[in-house]
Amino acid sequence: MLCLATVSVWFSLPALCSILLGPYVRFAGSDAATVKWLTTGTNSSIVEYGLTNSLGWRVEDPTPTTNHAVTITGLKARAKYYFVIKELINGQEVSSELFSFESDYNYSVPPAPAVPSPYTNDSMTQVYASVAEGSSTTRVWSAAIASITAVAMASWPTNWRAGRS
């Protein structure tokens, strides 16, 4: 992948961006996406992004790494975003080519709001809770019912147990 920037000496030379793999975008929630990429050398992680190719916003992680991940938050639903990856090479900020992603393809489920139960607590609430939790009382009753069923099955005529023959 080729990134262009000018390095001022006596004339302009293109500098190469060291992106080895990527970038790829993974949605991290209903309004967030993480841009990931690998580089050949360690560098900070910089992504400039926006709703047009003029960009306008910037997310940066100054920690030098070769395995980059920057999370963009506050994304609008059903919008196309443009972004570039930037890195510092010889003191110059170098941009990648322009990439894009669409939040239409974000199938993350928004978090469910905390809503109190519409069911009132009654005399059976604790029983239901203990069954759901698998309490020792529930296990004892289950074992007792299994034993009674086994005794009852043993006393039934053989032809009633495994299909009538």
Image: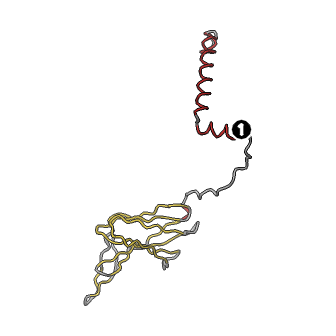
Q: Is residue 70 above or below residue 15?
A: above
Check disc 1 and give the amino acid type.
Met
Left/right placement of residue 78 relative to residue 69 reads right
Q: Is residue 34 above or below residue 153?
A: below
| Image coloring type | secondary structure
From the top left corner, tell me how far across and down residue 153 is, in percent. 62, 15
Quadrant of the drawing holding the N terminus: bottom left
From the top left corner, tell me how far across and down residue 36 is, in percent. 41, 64
Q: Quadrant of residue 145?
A: top right
Helix or strand or loop: what does disc 1 sit on?
Answer: loop
Q: Is residue 99 above or below residue 7?
A: above
From the top left corner, tell me how far across and down residue 124 is, in percent. 71, 38
Q: Going 55% across and 69% down the picture, which residue do you hit?
A: 74
From the top left corner, tell me how far across and down residue 133 is, in percent. 59, 39
Residue that sits furthest to the left in the current view:
10
Q: Nearer the viewer, residue 112 or 67?
A: 112
Q: Nearer the viewer, residue 17 or 41?
A: 41
Quadrant of the drawing holding the C terminus: top right
Q: Quadrant of residue 139?
A: top right
Residue that sits furthest to the bottom in the current view:
10
Q: Quadrant of residue 30?
A: bottom right
Left/right placement of residue 119 relative to residue 107 reads right
The residue carrying pointer 1 sits among few (fewer than 14), some (14 to 19) or many (20 or more) residues within 10 Å by Cα, namely few
Q: Nearer the viewer, residue 4 or 110?
A: 110
Q: Going 33% across and 77% down the picture, which residue do you hit?
A: 88
Residue position marked by numbered label 1 in the rendering: 124
Count of numbered labels shown in the rendering: 1
